[in-house]
Amino acid sequence: LKSILKNPHLLATKAYIGGQWVEGDNGTFAVTNPARGDVVAEVADVSRAQVAGAIAQAEAAQKEWAKLTGKERAAILRRWFDLMMENAEDLGKILTAEQGKPLAEAIGEIGYGASFIEFFGEEAKRVYGETIPGHQRDKRIMVLKQPIGVAASITPWNFPNAMITRKAGPALAAGCAFVARPAMETPLSALVLAVLAEQAGIPAGVFNVVPSSSASDVGKEFCENPGVRKLTFTGSTEVGRILLRQAADQVMKCSMELGGNAPFIVFDDADLDAAVEGAMLCKFRNNGQTCVCANRIYVQAGVYDEFAAKLKTAVEALKVGDGLSEGTTTGPLINDDAVAKVQEHIQDVTDKGGAILTGGLPHDLGGTFFQPTIVTDVTQDMLVAQDETFGPLAPLFKFEDEDDVIAMANDTIFGLASYFYAKDLSRVYKVAEALEYGIVGVNTGIISTELGPFGGVKQSGLGREGSHHGMEDYLEMKYICLSV
Ligand code: ADP
């Protein structure tokens, strides 16, 4: 990997704690390239005591960091953003090598991830409080917004850069210090952020990265250590529930970006070509491994066959391969479990009467490569209707009626992203209001931007990331009642 980087020093493998690069008390763990199966790096495996040490460093550093003006923090965050953009290609290569997504997509993620540092840096200047007319003649009511303290994050492997910057951006902008535990599959993308943080002049202890092979140990330390005042997590609903339970003992503020089960509805008045394009981006980006990927594609009966045919043409044009090879549109899946889940969902569909329109099998390339797949005649009793596939499987459900499809779309414990394609204006309003989701994409398959509030309802999570609302998750409100 080093040999293909313009700046080989970006490949850091030690933990970054209190401004120091340190070995892990538990030795190292291996990071493998999912496209080739080879070991890319051995990364420091920190102990629970080292995580506690990082929290202590963060606590001390946070007090000074919070004293800076918003404008001073903004200038430093701007440098961090600039460094990410200047090194985007190298950061992209590191990301592809450990995660598998095509290099163009990886570089796209770096731009997306960096945008949160840029945006929230700017927002650091706009942490406005409030004055409220007093309740008595001598009373003045003021509301201050103050940083919550030390924020700790646990993040997944599917967006190894952006899932961290979405949290660290608002945290640091608000005046919090940050301790990041990256996914074991993708620590290098987190560590390179620390390399650039150091270069940007982020003070020692304000941004820490603690790679560890024991997620549950780190999770417990984050929840039990009184130095942490905020837990921010992206991952499955299952683990989110565990962390919420653990965090309850300290009554810790939590942000949770959890699982989704996104419906993607194509009505008969939709622009079908646009809907196919949206579905391709929404379903097959990152090989289907995003929490906002279309998981259930509902197509109205009158356009079902035509949509299926057009989608088939588009899917068969995808090029599966190593993310670092020219022309690859679709990389490998992250691991064998991911492949097994896709196979389980396909098997369940065919067992219950559905059909495979294209794909359906592991790819000839072997490893964790899988054929982009479409299945038809999918119904609500199948596994894929309730469970997120997190892979390259597009299941097509047929529906007749608007109210029915809304009911089916909402029939899930999840409520993160949803999408639909339609032209009729009253239908657009009605359906957008009726979908029980935190995010609704109307005539678009891509909704992620630092400018919008990303987050879910129901069991998809708590809190919002992105937009000025994203800052609130890292701020406490203080009400001052002044008698004059
Ligand atoms: P994914 O399917 O995206 O890996 P998970 O929820 O399993 O979703 O994992 C998300 C992150 O949470 C990963 O970094 C993982 O290591 C971590 N994690 C898993 N179990 C726990 C736990 N019990 N406590 C804290 N973190 C955990």
Image (spheres, rainbow, N blue to C red):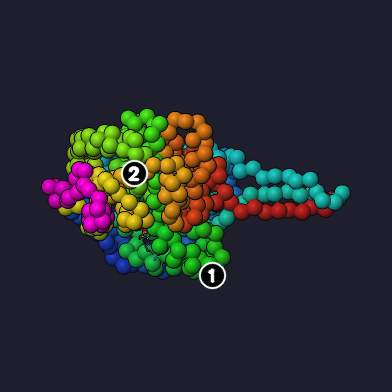
Q: Secondary structure at mark 1?
A: loop
Query: Above or below — where is 44 with respect to 319?
Result: below
x then y, percent, for residue 124: 56, 42
Q: Residue furthest left?
A: 364
Is residue 237 visible in the rendered structure shown here? yes
What residue is shown with label 1? 249
What residue is shown with label 2? 398
The magenta stretch spans residue 45? no
Q: Secondary structure at mark 2?
A: strand
Q: Residue at x 17, y 51 (%)?
A: 362
Q: Which residues are magenta?
A: 345-366
**Local crowd size for mark 2, using a 10 Å CA cut-off: few (<14), some (14–19), many (≥20):** many
x then y, percent, for residue 214: 34, 66
Q: Residue furthest right?
A: 137
Instruction: Determine the image quadrant of residue 275.
Output: top left
The magenta stretch spans residue 365? yes
Instruction: Determine the image quadrant of residue 318.
Output: top left
Q: Residue at x 50, y 52 (%)?
A: 457
Q: Residue at x 32, y 64 (%)?
A: 213
